[in-house]
Amino acid sequence: MSGEVHPLKFEDMMKINRISSPSVHPGGKFAAYVSSKHDHVENKVSSTIMLLDLEDGSSRELTPGDSKDSSPVWSPDGELLVFVSNRKDESQLWILPFKKGGEAYQLTKGEGGVSAPIWAPDGKRIAFTRSVVVSTHWDGNTEGISGDEKDKIKLAKTYGLVNEKSSARIEDSLLYRHWDHWRDMKRSHVFIIDIDSKEMKDITPGDADVPPISLGGSQDFSFSSEGDEIAYVKNPDPVVAVSTNNSVFIQKLNGIEPDGDAINISTTEAMDLEPRYSPDGRYLAYLGAEKATYEADRPRIKIYDRSSKETRTLTEELDRSPSDPVWKEDSSGLFFLAADMAYNSIYSVGLFENVEQHTSKTFNTDLRLVPDGMLLVSRQNMTGPAELFLIEPSDGVPPDLELDGAQKIIVDKRFTRLTDSGSAIKGVEIHPPEEFWYKGADDDPIHGFLIKPPGFDPSKKWPTLLIIHGGPQSAFFNHFHYRWNPQIFAAEGYVVVELNKFDHVLSGVTMIVRKDMIIP
């Protein structure tokens, strides 16, 4: 019967609406977020933008339909909501009048799609990224090209082939292929559009990706508080396949036009990412590593003084890798996230390196400030998917950096769960992970999770799946991993043991299945 308790199945996973990309309304009463639905029978994914009331937790759809709508961002005055939609095939920017009401209308058009929109402070311009063909043979114009042969003709024109239906490629440099796709001489560029005239400008022309093709952050370009400058991340090296030199550039603007040459402010040839201007306009913060060509190096929060042109490091002593920096409203410092053992904790740092920790033993993402001093975060664990929470974090304490399992538990002052995607798996038997530590080689501390299967009987032998995570990037976290959820293996009758050896960050997976172990 449907109401009976049962082990987690693939079909259960597909019932969960996946929550992402929250954006807080400037007034602080609402947030927009993306809810994605997966139809495994039809092999389709649709996503809609939801409006969440932060006071009572109610939600309603803003963009109903079967399209993929994503990346909602409020205008500075809160009257408009820009988002990305593929409702007319290729992804474009659409604007929804929120205050006055009415239907959403399309803002951009043209080849290359769009992604990652952000508003300028004046509310009259939007920056976004678009894929651009950098071939000298073809300018990207597809006018007059249509039908089933369109992609082949575009490819042939890109490479300057005589036969317009040829599928050949001519490459003389790296990277011409990245992971599972050909690059086809396309680069990501940042554009700025005037929302009234719809005139737009590519402000990062040339044979380089902005943001970079890899090692980037969640948002790698941003407007200054005055709106007369934009900072972005680009790797200026000729062969990015052997380089980690992602660098922060600042570009003066005159409306949508670049004003002069862009200036590289990075201080090393290691990776830099996620530039963020302070609200008062004095500083530009970003994440910067130190070791060139070492992509797993620990990033630090660095702060560039726009007047003195000097750069300081704020988190040198923190043995964690910051991500998602967010300035405090008074420009006195930043909140940020960092992988903390098997969790993702919230930290803060002032302008003079006083790092504090505000949460522990919770896995947080999508950190957003709410005007009343609260924080909006996405929170999840191995037994439940991501949900949005409104939290008042604890007062800051010195970071707990011990690697022995004796970390302090830091509790929020207040928290409210605002969404309930996990109700889709109500009635599914899932055992919470049991956390343990032990000493490994050279007395190094090893961390682990033990997940027992449904109906576990300690007197019986159980097949055991031992999964070891080893350096130097990422780790097994206490989160609801859709592609690698240990609860799926537990549902098949395995006892699952996941092991981490923590450094700054870790990676690599080795799996060993043993069927003769007795787990007490």
Image (cartoon, rainbow, N blue to C red):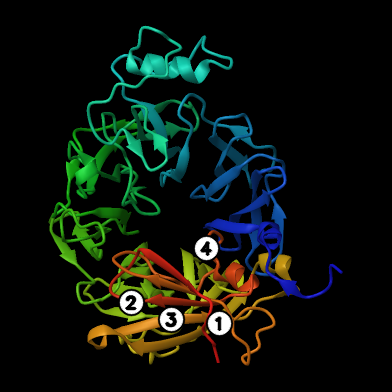
Answer left or right for 513 relative to 135.
right
Answer left or right for 239 relative to 339.
left
Q: In terms of sequence position, does the residue under pointer 3 or pointer 2 come before the other?
A: 3
Q: Position of residue 290 (x, y in %)?
A: 16, 61
Report the amino acid beneath label 1: Arg
Give the spatial CA distance, label 3 vs label 1. 29 Å
Report the amino acid beneath label 3: Gly
Contact check, label 3 and label 1, Cβ < 8 Å: no
Report the amino acid beneath label 2: Lys
- Label 2 Cα crowd, 10 Å radius (few <14 / some 14-19 / many 20+): many
Q: Which of the labelled discs sits on residue 414, or is there none?
A: 1
Q: Which of the labelled discs sits on residue 448, or is there none?
A: 3
| Mark 2 lies on residue | 501
Q: In terms of sequence position, does the residue under pointer 1 or pointer 2 come before the other?
A: 1
Q: In terms of sequence position, does the residue under pointer 4 or pointer 2 come before the other?
A: 4
Give the spatial CA distance, label 1 vs label 2. 33 Å
| Mark 4 lies on residue | 484
Answer left or right for 331 relative to 240.
right
Q: Residue at x 59, y 85 (%)?
A: 461
* Helix, strand or loop at mark 3: strand
Quarter of the image for the C terminus: give it.
bottom right
